[in-house]
Image (cartoon, rainbow, N blue to C red):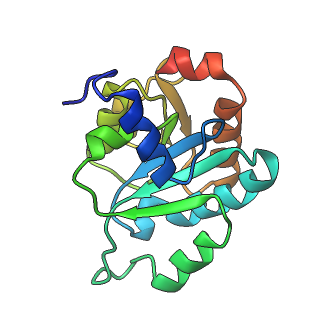
Amino acid sequence: RFAPGRVDAERVAVLRKEMGAGPDDLVVGIVGRLVHEKGYREVFEAARRIAVRAPNVRFGIVGPSDPDKADAVTAAEISAAETIGNISFLGMRHDVADLYAAMDMYALASYREGFPRSAMEAAAMGVPVIATNIRGCRQVVEPGVTGMLVPARDAGALTDAITAMANDAGLRAAMG
């Protein structure tokens, strides 16, 4: 199910378009419930900064809203994030394995994790991972080999890591 190359190029092109990406854009994928403990404040701030630094970088966010949670990302926050212009919310999806094939890099900005399944799935699909330096993420990402680790709650470090990976196709290929 999570095998690089399993998804054909035509399907990848369709999925990239759903994430707002054209053929020359790069996609940062994020999979997870829309709650703040997943680091969405930092993701939105990184997207805002990257819109200026690297306008060809798009963010595809996959996951359901979770309005019953105290730290739910609100509809107003989603609307504000969409106005940045480089973020697409795809909602709950059942084709996440296919979506990984359309990502150029994967980001997980969580504050806490057990064992982050989405980061493990992205890595299995050959997608380099940028994750927070927390328990769980450290077990999935080998820094400098399969991805990068950044401090939790640090939008600047997340921005820098995404920008560095976006600017270096060789790095993305090696870490994938």
Write the residue at 66% across / 45% down.
57
Kindly tell me whether residue 2 is visible in this rendering.
yes
Q: Is residue 109 above or below residue 37?
A: above
Q: Which residue is outermost to the left?
A: 1
* In-image side of 64 versus 170 (left or right): left
Write the residue at 57% across / 46% down.
151
Residue 90 lies, in percent from the top left, at 40, 61
Write the residue at 48% across / 44% down.
16
In which quarter of the view is residue 51 placed? bottom right
Residue 119 lies, in percent from the top left, at 36, 39
Residue 146 lies, in percent from the top left, at 46, 22
State the quadrant of the N terminus: top left
Kindly tell me whether residue 101 is visible in this rendering.
no
Q: Nearer the viewer, residue 169 or 153?
A: 169
Q: Which residue is outermost to the right?
A: 52
- In this rendering, the count of numbered labels is 0
Q: Nearer the viewer, residue 99 or 166?
A: 99
Write the residue at 40% across / 33% down.
10
Residue 63 lies, in percent from the top left, at 34, 61
Q: Nearer the viewer, residue 99 or 135?
A: 99
